[in-house]
Amino acid sequence: MSDDHLNSNRIRQMASLRRGAIRSRSYCVIALGGCIVGAAEFIFDAFRRWPIPANLRGVLVAVLYLFCSLALLALGGYFLKLAIRFHREARMSALPPPAMPPDFSQLQDGSQVVRNLEDM
């Protein structure tokens, strides 16, 4: 196989991995939003159902809603960490940094172009 074919396969593979990381990050952000909205709903329902005359069932339901909201917030924190990890993965370069700095000693300043045009 030629090097060009291998390079094109590697480029396609890296592009596919980057698209997958971006897609996964999007799913995590959507799940994070759902967890935050769900936790807010549970908190709202807990305070709405909190009984003025304290009966045991109403208090237990309200406390259960508050625990569910805490669980959703913890799950949202997990999705936030995943989204950050996928974001870093998507932004990561496929090429490692060079081991040595580039050598610019062979480069010219461009004045040879002017001399070539004058010689014409």
Image: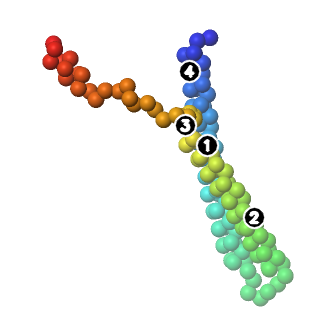
Residue 39 x/y as whole percent: 68, 66
Residue at image coords 31%, 26%: 108
Residue 67 x/y as whole percent: 77, 70
Q: CA distance from mark 4 to mark 3?
A: 21 Å
Q: Amino acid at mark 3?
A: Pro
Which circle's residue, 2 or 1, is located before the other in the chain? 2
Q: CA distance from mark 4 to mark 2?
A: 46 Å
Disc 4 to disc 2: CB gap under 8 Å: no
Classify the position of the N terminus by image quarter: top right
- For disc 3, the neighbor class at 10 Å (few under 14, some 14 to 19, many from 20) is few
Please name the residue that numbered disc 2 is placed on. 71
Please name the residue that numbered disc 4 is placed on. 8
Please name the residue that numbered disc 1 is placed on. 89
Residue 16 x/y as whole percent: 60, 31
Badge number at residue 60: none
Which circle's residue, 4 or 3, is located before the other in the chain? 4
Q: Residue furthest top?
A: 1
The correct choice, above or below, for 86 with respect to 66 in the image is above
Please name the residue that numbered disc 3 is placed on. 97
Mark 4 or 2: in front is 4
Q: Secondary structure at mark 2?
A: helix
Residue at image coords 63%, 62%: 37
Q: CA distance from mark 3 to mark 1?
A: 16 Å
Could you say which quadrant of the image residue 35 lies in?
bottom right
Mark 3 or 2: in front is 3
Which circle's residue, 4 or 2, is located before the other in the chain? 4
Residue 119 x/y as whole percent: 16, 14
- For disc 1, the neighbor class at 10 Å (few under 14, some 14 to 19, many from 20) is some
Classify the position of the C terminus by image quarter: top left
Q: Amino acid at mark 4?
A: Ser
